[in-house]
Amino acid sequence: MAKIILDNIAHTYIPEAPDPLFALKKMSLSWDDGGRYALLGPSGCGKTTMLNIMSGLVTPSHGKVLFGERDVTKVITEERNIAQVFQFPVIYGTMTVYENLAFPLKCRQFPEEQIDKKVKEVSEILNLQDFLNDRAKGLTADQKQLISLGRGLVREDVAAILMDEPLTVIDPDLKFRLRRKLKEINSKYKTTLIYVTHDQNEAMTFADNIIVMDQGEVVQAGSPKELFEKPQTTFVGYFIGSPAMNLYNCQALSSNEVSIGSLKFKIKSNIDNSQSKELKLGIRSEFITVEDSFGDNTIQADINEVEDFGNYKLITAHYDEMKIKAKVKREQNVPSEKVILKFPSERCCIYENNKLI
């Protein structure tokens, strides 16, 4: 196992075009050995292309792929020691579960005793030990996907396990259990796991580090907490979180104050050097509070709806054309018609040309 480095890579599927469209725009990224990562973004943003470049299924148009200090850009997939789990289970239906798990080791001519030991060890981790003699085609979809995963785990020399939307075919009730199993595997084997998804909940509950992509670019990389509290672009603010971040066009009044229509808001960001009139104020619904009286950064809004989701209430309100979503604790008392809402200055993010100042 080794650190994976994407050095100044970019890729286009039509290099002969006069002005080629790049599925992956020039970028550099590194993936620490033993890390747990998620590649998150909408369909068509370049996630799978990046994954296939790491595995060797695609050779980048520009740049290098390094495993540690070894340049593997031109190295074929078979020689990269990468395990890849696809969206739909790839198994040998006529083989038993045991034979499926043993297959990668048999191909590399491992001794039978070593194969048997490793297959039984991995099958216990994946709760497949009771099915080792069963034909794979008779198993459930999640068990088949576990076999795909297990074929990567039996190899101790694997550099990383790359997973492209691996839980798509899995029943929703089983997804949480499988994500938990993946985290246990990462903890036990210290195997680098890279998980591609368009589902923010999957990414936030699985990964220690999330790479958010949009239109072939990495727009932010960081921990779930960093992405939630300080989205670096309005896209990340909108894409991460439910509901999406509240975003409003605003005007600069001073270095630490902006206006939204007739309303004034103090902020912690210094916008002295802002050169653009394209400013936006963003704040998470979780950070807006209900107040009993007026103060700094408070407004009186008209309530449209209050929804009870069990452990929290979601307030939908408006002030003139300004629509507001606020999440509050279930026990919070909410008036029926008008409510005083506070936008804490330390929670207000200011964006210039859709990028965080």
Image (cartoon, rainbow, N blue to C red):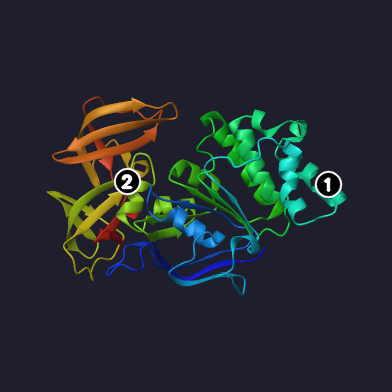
How far across and how far down the image is residue 290, in percent? 31, 37
Q: Is residue 198 left or right of residue 81?
A: left
Residue 15 position (above or below residue 109): below
Residue at disc 2, secondary structure: loop
Q: Nearer the viewer, residue 96 or 142?
A: 96
How far across and how far down the image is residue 243, in percent? 34, 39
The residue type indicated by label 1 comes to: Lys
The residue type indicated by label 2 comes to: Met
Residue position for label 1: 117
Q: CA distance from mark 1 to mark 2?
A: 50 Å
At 37% from the left edge and 41% from the top edge, which residue is drawn? 286
Residue position for label 2: 245
Residue 16 position (above or below residue 208): below
**Rendered-image quadrant of the C terminus:** bottom left
Lower sequence index among marks 1 and 2: 1
Q: Nearer the viewer, residue 173 or 291?
A: 173
Residue at disc 1, secondary structure: helix
The nearer-to-camera label among 1 and 2 is 1
